[in-house]
Image (cartoon, grey):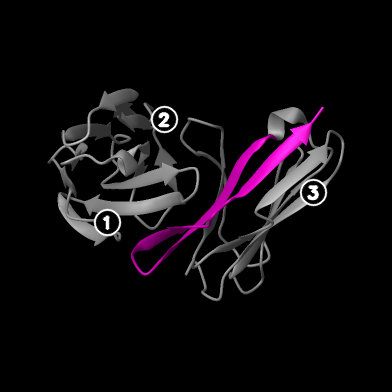
Amino acid sequence: KAGVTQTPRYLIKTRGQQVTLSCSPISGHRSVSWYQQTPGQGLQFLFEYFSETQRNKGNFPGRFSGRQFSNSRSEMNVSTLELGDSALYLCASSLMGVTEAFFGQGTRLTVV
Amino acid sequence: TQLLEQSPQFLSIQEGENLTVYCNSSSVFSSLQWYRQEPGEGPVLLVTVVTGGEVKKLKRLTFQFGDARKDSSLHITAAQPGDTGLYLCAGGNFNKFYFGSGTKLNVKP
C-alpha cells in the first residue's frame, strides 16, 4: 500500500510570490490535514479536508488556503509569501480524520 | 492552550539509560497515537492505544494508555542513539485531531 506522497520535497521562493503544494493520501483515506512545522512552534494545524469539504481550520491568515479533489488528493496554496512562512509543511492522511494519521515526508519551503 | 501536554520538552541522556515521556490531557480520547519524527522528515506512527489501561510493547518501547483514557506514557528501555528524535503524542476528539508539542530526545553514544 503506497504511503502519503508530498510534492515537491524542497522549494525556494521569493517574498511576495505564491506557492502550491500537493499531497496524495493513502488510497481509501478521505481525510487530509495540513500542518506547518517550524523549530520554535512545533506542529501547527492549518486545515483538514474530508470528502472535498474543509472540515476544520486552524488559526492561520487567509493567505493560506487549500482544496481537496474528488480522488482525495489535496493541494495547499500560500499567496504573498513572507519570510516567516519558511517551514516544513506536512500533509497527513487519515481514514476518518479522528483516527490515526499517516504523514508524508513533507515539503521544505524556504522563502528568501 | 494545548489539549495534549507533553513532558519533558527536552531530554538528553546517555546510551543505555531508561526514560519515560508523558502525554497528559484533561479530555478523554477514544485513542492516542505516538509518533517519532527525525529532522526534516514527516512523523512516523509508532503505535495506537485504544483501551483504557492498555499496554503495548514495540521492542524496547512500552506504551501505556491511562485507565481514564486521558493520558499516556512512553517508556524506552536501554536507549540507543537511533532513538534520537522528536516524540509526539496525538489523539482524536470531537471530529478534530490534536498533537502534543513533543519531547525532543537526544541519546548520546
Is the residue under label 2 in contact with that under label 1 (CB below 8 Å)?
no
The tag on residue A60 is 1
At 50% from the left and 48% from the top, the residue drawn is A40
Instruction: Decide which of A29, A62 is in the foreground and name it.
Output: A62
In the image, are marks 3 and 1 on the same chain? Answer: no
- Lateral position of residue B62 relative to residue B50, left or right: right
* Magenta extent: B84-109
The quadrant in which residue B76 appears is top right
Graded by Cα atoms within 10 Å as few (under 14), some (14 to 19) or many (20 or more), the crowding at tag 3 reads: some
Residue that label 3 marks = B19
Residue A4: quadrant of the picture: top left
Image disc number at residue A105: 2
> Nearer the observer, disc 1 or disc 2?
1
Magenta stretch, main secondary structure class? strand
Of the two numbered discs 1 and 2 on the same chain, state the one appearing first in sequence. 1
Give the chain letter at badge 2. A
List x then y, in percent, for residue A51. 18, 50
